[in-house]
Image: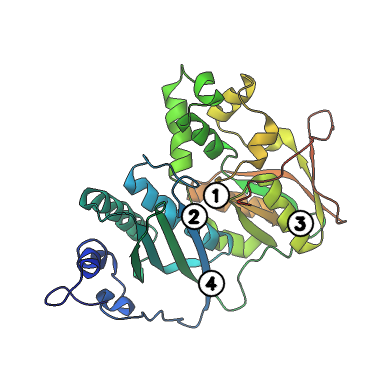
Amino acid sequence: MMPPGAGASGEDSLIARYFRPLATDPGAFALGDDAAILKAMGDDIVVTTDAIVEGVHFLPGDPPDTIAQKALRVNLSDLAAKAAAPAGFVLTLALRAADDAWLASFARGLGADSSRFGCPLLGGDTVSTPGPLMISITAFGRVAAGQMLRRSGAKPGDRVVVTGTVGDAMLGLDILKGGAVAAALADDAAARELLVGRYRVPQPRNALAQALRDHAHAAMDVSDGLAGDLAKLCMASGVSAVIDIPSIPLSAAAATALARRAVGMEALVSGGDDYEILCAIPEDGFDALARAAGIAGVAVSSIGTVIAGRSAPRFLDAQGRDLPLSRLAYSHF
């Protein structure tokens, strides 16, 4: 990257105007070099990357600041599930055009979350594209050596625990697309707003990183759907699980949509974009995790039990009947 001035390109000017103010870490060199330095400080460095694409993860008319927030927060959610503290991120931004108003709003949203979560911009790239807008972020976190929480590690007898509520984001997308949920909640503007907000701006649970490191055997974030991501965690751990459907936490808005038959439970547990934490907690660790979560203002729910075996996790209703799942999770392919 080149500093603004003689010989600076339009890309250099764009970076200087909108993104240099976000590069607050000394190792970013004010985005004036070709690479950055991230000091390990004796910890392991955790690396995760996610891209969001227009028409897939956000809609063309979504506010630019919320697009920026979502791009960063989906990566912060991964760091939280690994029990890592955010350390910084690099950004790749593929734009159809350099729209000043759009970029100013995008940079404001990105800067606010960068400051809020202590995750400064370290560098990146801007490119033009004839296709859909795409934002790719690679985030870095720090965790004490050997302490990163993995998907593997769940043990029979552990509680299956999830943060927050499940299914809201897929309902928010349905509302934005004018689907059945939009019609069912036509009389409840607050519920519609809540669900749309959950789709546009995830709530990464980084405040629980330390508690997860202290008490969880295994964890991952719920990005593709509770059912599918639970199956991935169980497979990595060589176990299975039984889930009590009535214990799955739903927001009041989601419960209303369910009661009005605008959506079924299968869709709620297989829809994507929740970005909650799914974890396996030993029985003697749950109360301590719940206390830490309460202090952090994050709801946690015990929804089932890890069991021995390698069969697919079972979802049982109040009568002990299996919920048939034709699709476990959102899939790009």
Q: Quadrant of residue 130?
A: bottom left
Left or right side of 38 for 81: right
Measured Cα–Cα span from mark 3 to mark 2: 22 Å
Q: Which mark is residue 234?
A: 3
Q: Position of residue 182 (x, y in %)?
A: 50, 24
Residue 92 relative to residue 265: left or right: left
Residue type pointed to by label 3: Cys
Say which residue appears at 75% left-offset and 63% top-offset. Answer: 236
Q: Earlier in the sequence, mark 3 or mark 4?
A: 4
Give the mark nearest the N terminus, 4 or 2.
4
Dot 2: within a 10 Å radius of its alpha carbon, few (fewer than 14), some, or many (20 or more) residues?
A: many
* Above or below 172: residue 34: below
Q: At 60% from the left edge and 70% from the top edge, which residue is drawn?
A: 148
Judging from the image, the colouring scheme is: rainbow
Which secondary structure lies at badge 4?
A: strand
Q: CA distance from mark 1 to mark 4?
A: 18 Å
Q: Earlier in the sequence, mark 2 or mark 1?
A: 2
Determine which residue is flagged by label 1.
275
- Picture quadrant where residue 39 is located: bottom left
Location of mark 2 (residue):
74
Tag 2 and tag 1, C-beta contact below 8 Å: yes
Q: Which residue is mark 4?
A: 46
Within-10-Å neighbours for mark 3: few <14, some 14–19, many 20+: many
Q: Nearer the viewer, residue 95 or 228?
A: 95
